[in-house]
Image (tube, rainbow, N blue to C red):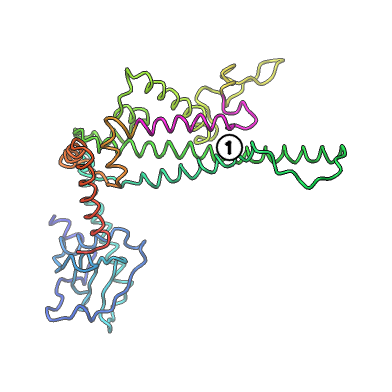
Amino acid sequence: MASLRRRVAKKLVGFAPDFPEDRDRGGLRSSKPDAAEFPVPELVLFTLRNLMGWRWHGPGEKVRWSVYGSVAGEPVGFELRKFGFTVLRSVHAVVPDDRIIGQLQSALKVVEAALEPVAQSQIDLGEVLIVNRSSEFDARYRFFRENADKAYRKADKPPRPKTPRAMDGKSLIADLTAGLNRSMSLTREGFFHSAAMVDAYFSALEHRLVLLRAFSGAPLEPGDLRRILADKWDDKLKAVAVIAGDTEAERLLAAMRRIKDRIRNPFAHGGVENDGGSLFFHLPHIGAIPANFTRFGDSVRFSFTPIEAADHKECCAAFDQLDELLSSGPLFGPHRLLDGGIDPSFSGEALKAYAEAAAGGERALDRFIEVWSHRWERHANMDY
């Protein structure tokens, strides 16, 4: 710590903790740097309070913390307010703002390098939280699903009849062609939305499975969190849901793997198919033959439109079935915590609390979510 303090002090020449005792902080002018200049303002508090010994206050009304000192003899303060990180200066300040901002940013780079091993150690121990973004992921999936549904329905529905007219052969062909083009265009639109839906669902699924692993309350050994994050989606699934020995669950897992291999992977990885279906070898005097031979019949590229309405419906059915599996039975409680918007921590204490809440039934779950949400809202709104 002493070594870090010395290195930071070299970056903060002119910075001192001697804010005048009798100075009225309310008389200082305030300005807000661009948010990108100090994306993690808490590091400013750590640097100036913990390392440089500046005086501080907090929390206060709509202010999480304030820290005060001087630069080149001029009073300076920094605050984290509800509406952003704020710099406080004297109305008649001479020291340029750019100097203060630049020196502080330079010091933070030293602090970050020193804290990096601490962060990695905390990850290894599970002493971290993950922001719960399940509602965002789910909304993206639902958006594409709803748009795909609409497009496929319209493609199946014949257009409204036009005003009656003499139907000669030429006009009949024109009408049939227009109807066919309309149907093909809408089917193509459905395909675009459905491909995006599949990708969005698997992204949402991986996020959800990591959160459910925390909310299940099962304890972790050091290093487990890194392994969980690195696991493939199906291993994450098997870690939270009972699959082996359950015929329906095994069938569902097989269907999800088929969707992943047939649809998601080719569109997410530049058209590459795992079984060689995107590769064609030259058979002399015959032509180009797919490297997966007759398995090409199951390729997403076998049809003119890669994802037809029936394929989309099949995907939706599997996703709905998996959603049911992940929100019922043993996972009812963990899923309620997830759906409640709680940001899970992977510490031993937090995991134990999640397990107790889930075991306590709906009343215990509702109470846990209510208390957590109240504390979160107070913190987010800085209502101290």
Residue 265 location in percent, x, y? 49, 32
Q: How many marks?
A: 1
Residue 278's place in the image compared with 183, above or below, is: above
Residue at figure coordinates x 58%, y 25% from the top left: 279
Residue 121 visible? The answer is: no
Residue 214: give x, y in percent of width and height.
Answer: 25, 38
Position of 275 relative to 28 (above/below): above
Q: Main secondary structure of the magenta part?
A: helix
Image-based side of 254 in relation to 351, left or right: right
* 363, 21: nearer the viewer: 363
Does residue 324 appear to the left or right of 308 in the view shown?
A: left
For label 1, the SS is helix
Three-letter code, disc 1? Phe
What residue is drawn where x is 48% and y is 28%?
259
Q: Percent x, y for residue 171? A: 84, 41
Quadrant (top left/top right/bottom left/bottom right) for the N terminus: bottom left
235 relative to 374 in the view: left or right: right
Q: Nearer the viewer, residue 287 or 2?
A: 287
Residue highlighted by disc 1: 191
Q: Quadrant of the C terminus?
A: bottom left
Image coordinates for residue 272, horizontal then vertical, percent: 53, 30
- As rendered, which of 117 and 274 lies closer to the eye? 274
Which span of residues is magenta-colored? 299-325
Farthest-out residue, front = 164
